[in-house]
Image (cartoon, rainbow, N blue to C red):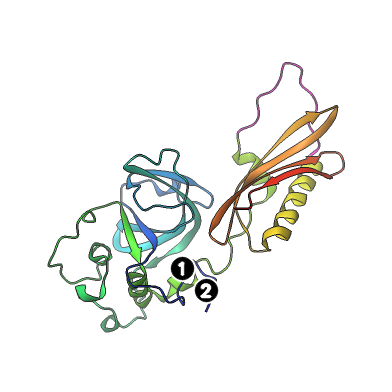
């Protein structure tokens, strides 16, 4: 059965299949600087091996009492794939309040605390769900990033059923004002001109959003959007560009919208 959440809960996959990653945030890290929707972060001490754009990530808070899930996001394209360390992530949703690793209503006797049921023993130990560890997992002990396999995912859901709801509905799309305020303003020329009105900007962004939803469905998740003004042959245009997720695949887009009428003049959208 197809799954609409963050992970393929109901899709039969092999136990060792990697379905995502867990990245650990420590107590002394300022979460307010990166733990917010649409915020990117470079984890310089996370291993780049195995990371692919679009893969889901669970953010785990450790050090302040019991470990807890504090948010989720996606792996972003790394500009330097040859490096051993360095992983870019995009925070999609902040969990407020955080989800405890073990739900208070769950019977702990139902959670496996033996190594036989875990593909990644380092993950089970980091979460406090393994009672002991006979062997040291190679390359995982003390790592910033921990691989999440299909088998381990179901161990996590037994301990915290709330994880199944993550990603079941897209986060709210930010208002156009948020997009423009979050982006650096373009440099002004020596002969300043009056930019198009705010109403035209909103019209342009709505034209773009409506067209992308027509192409990829109403549940598309926008990663970024930047709008700048431009002039071509004496006419003002809004250039609207950014990226989105569609079926766990990032796609880039760029539109040109006439600032005075909201007419769609040109567009380029990744199809692959």
Q: Which numbered circle lies on residue 197?
A: none
Identify which residue is drawn at 26% across, 52% down. 143
**Of helix, strand and loop, which mostly describes the magenta segment?**
loop
Residue closest to the far left = 134
**Cα separation between marks 1 and 2:** 7 Å
The quadrant holding residue 240 is top right
Identify which residue is drawn at 50% across, 47% down. 39
Q: Are marks 1 and 2 in contact (CB under 8 Å)?
A: yes
Q: What secondary structure is marked by label 1?
A: loop
Residue bearing mark 2: 3
The quadrant holding residue 41 is top left
Q: Nearer the viewer, residue 148 or 49?
A: 49
Residue bearing mark 1: 7
Residue 272 visible, this orientation: yes
Q: Is 64 covered by the magenta stretch?
A: no
* Residue numbers of the magenta segment: 184-197
Tell me: 137 left or right of 242: left
Q: What secondary structure is marked by label 2?
A: loop
For residue 129, above or below residue 268: below
Q: Position of residue 155 (x, y in %)?
A: 33, 74
The quadrant holding residue 179 is top right
Residue 33 visible, this orientation: no
Q: What crowding class fits label 1: few (fewer than 14 Cα within 10 Å), some (14-19), or many (20 or more)?
A: many
């Amino acid at each position: 059965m197809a799954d609409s959440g963050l992970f393929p809960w109901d899709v039969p996959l092999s136990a060792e299949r990697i379905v995502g990653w867990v990245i650990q945030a420590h107590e002394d890290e300022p979460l307010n600087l990166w733990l917010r929707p649409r915020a990117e972060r470079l984890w310089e001490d996370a291993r780049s091996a195995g990371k692919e754009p679009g893969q889901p990530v669970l953010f785990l808070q450790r050090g302040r009492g019991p470990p807890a899930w504090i948010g989720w996001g996606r792996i972003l394209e790394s500009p330097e794939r040859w490096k051993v360390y360095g992983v870019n992530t995009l925070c999609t949703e902040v969990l407020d309040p955080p989800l405890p690793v073990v739900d208070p209503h769950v019977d702990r006797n139902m959670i496996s605390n033996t190594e036989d049921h875990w593909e990644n023993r380092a993950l089970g130990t980091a979460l406090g769900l393994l009672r002991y560890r006979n062997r040291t997992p190679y390359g995982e002990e003390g790592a910033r990033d921990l691989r999440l396999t299909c088998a381990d995912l179901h161990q996590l859901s037994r301990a915290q059923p709330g994880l199944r709801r993550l990603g079941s509905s897209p986060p709210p799309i930010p208002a156009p004002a948020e997009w423009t305020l979050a982006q650096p303003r373009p440099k002004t020329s020596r002969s300043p001109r009056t930019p198009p009105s705010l109403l035209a900007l909103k019209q342009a962004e709505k034209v773009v959003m409506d067209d992308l939803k027509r192409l990829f469905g109403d549940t598309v998740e926008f990663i970024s959007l930047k709008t700048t003004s431009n002039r071509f042959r004496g006419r003002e245009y809004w250039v609207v560009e950014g990226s989105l997720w569609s079926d766990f695949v990032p796609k880039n887009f760029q539109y040109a919208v006439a600032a005075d009428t909201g007419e769609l003049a040109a567009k380029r959208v990744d199809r692959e």
